Amino acid sequence: MRISHKNLGVAGAALGLALAVPTAQAADPIKIGVIAETSAISGVGIPNAAKMAAEEINKAGGVNGQMIEIVDYDDHNSAVDAVRAFQRAAQQDHVAAVIASYVSEVVLALEPWSGRLKMPLITPGAASNDITKRVHDDYDHLKYVFHGYLASTQIADVVCEASKTLMINDLHMKTAVVMSEDAAWTIPLDEEFLKCLPAGGLKVLDHIRLSPDTTDFTPIFNKIEGLKPDVIVTGISHVGVQPTVQWQQQQVPMPMYGVSSQATNATFWKDTNGASDGVIFNMVAAPDVAVTPKTIPFAKAYQAKYGSLPGYAAYQSYDDVYMWVDAIRKAGGTDPDKMVEAMEQTDYVSTIGRIVFLPKTDTFAHGMKIGPGYISGLMVQWQNGNPVTVWPANVATGKMVFPAFTKLPQ
């Protein structure tokens, strides 16, 4: 049969339409936005880990046949840029949920927008108590916000509890100086330090708050040395490399112990050229400890994929993708109010422990339940290029070791 050019054109169009139909009918992906500080040591792991989780979920078939797509945004350590990214994620890119930032100021800036846009939001690393307090105080508007990390007060309590064993019982220390950066997350952290350190047996000789823009720590370390404390208890995140390097260069004889977010990253040893040797810092999960059966496999897979071990916020970001996906599955879709209801029922064994969110009546509403059987904490020390867990004793993989310039109580 002869087909005219005219008929051929019609046939071709029909064939093209037929081929286009399956594509049009293919389920659109479910998008999850990730807003992070990708140029920062502690921020780069947030989108990396989220993409890992999405790849695993997609290999397993996605959610009811829909694939998970991570849409990531760099906020350049700016709350203004983060808000713009959040608005774009919700209004243009139509994400179902957002995982955002390890910086408290950024998350606090996003929180009201989460309520205005009814966009579910979780942070994998910010610590300010105000994140959950706002949910408690204005639940109807801010119920879309969840806290996927410990609040500052809770972090301080872990550090203080560990100090009873590590600093007081093991090293016979009696005095401390608290040295923290001036930031939203350290206000409640320091308030709790000033209560729980003395309660545990460490007298606080001074409380130093420093600008995150500080580059020369010499005057600060000179002041601390003049006070002759047994230990420096830190609350640092935006700064980390510089004070650690200068601590080593100036042979400051007191150990650095406490919270140092940058120290949680595998690159910290290299970034400080080994000056981090002996620094003890808090984590909720570490690559050498099976906090749950998922912890070590995740750390190994992350290292295989990205060439370094995950920083602290990467663990939570990875878990947050799985929890949002589970909430979407239980909600039967991406309706934000139904997702919130499903998220509130979370009971999930993650890389950092068993995650259960606190009810709206709790002061830490939508924060994680803390304690034995749920989320606790570890103290980890840099030793000869490796992070070694030194507390609690039941999961410790090594004992504390300090550089030669450190002077410990006799």
Image (spheres, rainbow, N blue to C red):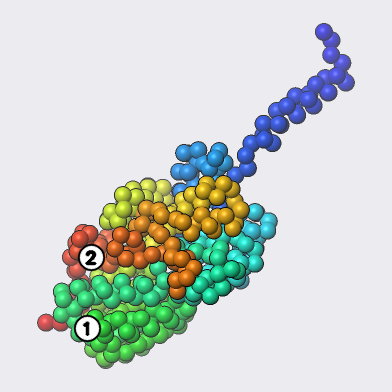
Q: Residue furthest left?
A: 410
Q: Which residue is rendered at x = 43% and y = 81% of the image?
A: 187
Q: Which residue is mark 1?
A: 201
Residue nearest the viewer, comparing 240 with 301: 301
Question: Which residue: 34% across, 62% down?
Answer: 375
Q: Residues within 10 Å of mark 2 (few under 14, many from 20)?
A: some
Q: Label 1, secondary structure: give it.
A: loop
Q: Earlier in the sequence, mark 1 or mark 2?
A: 1
Instruction: State the image quarter where residue 218 is shown.
Output: bottom left
In the visual, does 294 lie left or right of 22? left
The residue where tag 2 is placed is: 392
Disc 1 crowd, CA 10 A, few/some/many (<14, 14-19, 20+): some
Q: State the separation of the CA atoms marked 1 and 2.
A: 18 Å
- Where residue 152 sits: x, y (%)? 40, 74
In the rendered image, the vertical position of residue 85 relative to residue 404, given as above or below: above
Q: Position of residue 23 (x, y in %)?
A: 67, 34
Give the number of marks: 2
In the image, is 16 to the left or to the right of 238?
right
For the C terminus, give its image quadrant: bottom left
Q: Secondary structure at mark 2?
A: loop
Q: Residue at x 62, y 58 (%)?
A: 89
Q: Which mark is residue 57?
A: none
Residue at image position (46%, 79%) is 183
Left or right: 312 with respect to 105?
left
Amino acid tagged 2:
Pro
Residue 392 visible at all: yes
Q: Position of residue 155 (x, y in %)?
A: 36, 72
Locate residue 4, reporting x and y percent. 87, 16
Residue 212 visible in the picture: no
